[in-house]
Image (spheres, grey):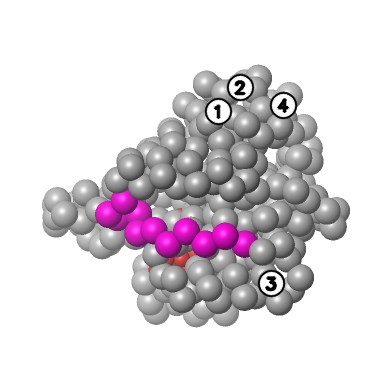
Amino acid sequence: MHKSNQKVGNMQNHQKYKPQANALANKIILVTGAGDGIGREAALNYAKYGATVILLGRTVAKLEAVYDDIVAAGGAEPAIIPLDMKGATENHYRDMAATIVDQFGRLDGLLHNASMLGILSPFGHVDLPTWNDVMHVNVTAQFMMTKALLPALLNSNAASVIFTSSGVGRKGRAHWGPYAVSKFATEGMAQVLADEYEGTNLRVNVINPGATRTKMRSRAYPAEDVNLLKTPADLMPTYLYLMADDSQPVTGASLNAQ
Ligand SMILES: NC(=O)c1ccc[n+]([C@@H]2O[C@H](COP(=O)([O-])OP(=O)(O)OC[C@H]3O[C@@H](n4cnc5c(N)ncnc54)[C@H](OP(=O)(O)O)[C@@H]3O)[C@@H](O)[C@H]2O)c1
């Protein structure tokens, strides 16, 4: 993206990134939507490479299962934040940020992964409640969460924030209405933040996962052969690269994980 050509270095290799075993040691990383799909895989991988992971999601049983998997694999004990981003207010995010600062003193990584698809339909059929829900969960919640966590992120020596986009967040597509618009907004939020914090210890980038074998993808394409899709595990080099200090000083980039 803007101003980024010299800063991105050999970023094109991110899909083949192989982290050192301790690439994320001592990092405190919050993952939203950590109970399933891509977020679950990212949380497991961040813990595998040494991070203490904060698992945020709305289904506690799924978060507890990820917690158990991390501990069983010898990872640092995670924290769990049960939160439905559909109903959460600024106060929830302020309280959450205060708890993180109390417990850890800082936040080194934030993966904005949770989002909702809404209903795929012609634009003229999109109902306002669906529009509002998708914008709230995919855009407004991320604004509130990022804003509340900025002080904790700025307490880190090297903080990385990653937003999650989509192919339809870069080129609109028929029938993807609110979801596509929310992903354009996500790309925009990341660009604004990257520009504001350029030259500081806080970097902000975007990942477009591409078609991936998850429940969200099955809802959008119920008839396709899932065996032809990449799995969340296939995407992890890019998710690890942007979270690790090896990607410094990349900021303001929007990367394809496949
Ligand atoms: N899969 C793809 O092909 C694809 C392609 C492009 C972009 N993406 C993006 O990649 C990200 C991850 O998608 P995915 O495919 O892994 O989706 P997924 O399997 O549906 O997982 C989404 C996760 O987000 C959580 N979540 C949803 N709404 C929430 C809310 N209101 N509050 C808290 N947590 C909530 C879900 O919690 P529950 O488990 O409780 O439902 C789930 O853990 C999303 O941003 C998506 O837009 C995916």
Mark 1 or 4, closer to the camera: 1
N-terminal of the pair, mark 4 or mark 3, is: 4
Circle 4 sits on which residue?
7
N-terminal of the pair, mark 4 or mark 2, is: 4
N-terminal of the pair, mark 3 or mark 1, is: 3
Name the secondary structure under disc 1: helix
Mark 4 or 3, closer to the camera: 3
Is 208 in front, or is 163? 163
Which of the labelled discs sits on residue 71, or is there none?
3
The percent position of residue 214, horizontal first and vertical second, equals 49, 71
Name the secondary structure under disc 3: helix
As measured in the structure, the alpha-carbon distance from the residue carrying label 3 to the one carrying label 1 is: 34 Å
Circle 1 sits on which residue?
194
Above or below for 128 versus 247: below
Name the secondary structure under disc 2: loop
Above or below for 130 versus 196: below
Instruction: Classify residue 2 as left or right of residue 10.
Output: left
* Residues marked 2 and 1 touching at CB (< 8 Å): yes
Q: Residue at x 39, y 64 (%)?
A: 58
Determine the image quadrant of residue 237. Answer: bottom right
The percent position of residue 18, horizontal first and vertical second, equals 81, 55
As measured in the structure, the alpha-carbon distance from the residue carrying label 1 to the one carrying label 4 is: 13 Å
As measured in the structure, the alpha-carbon distance from the residue carrying label 2 to the one carrying label 1 is: 6 Å
Which of the labelled discs sits on residue 198, or is there none?
2
As measured in the structure, the alpha-carbon distance from the residue carrying label 2 to the one carrying label 3 is: 36 Å
Mark 2: few, some, or many residues within 10 Å (few <14, many ≥20)?
some
Is 190 in front, or is 143? 143
Check disc 3 and give the amino acid type. Val
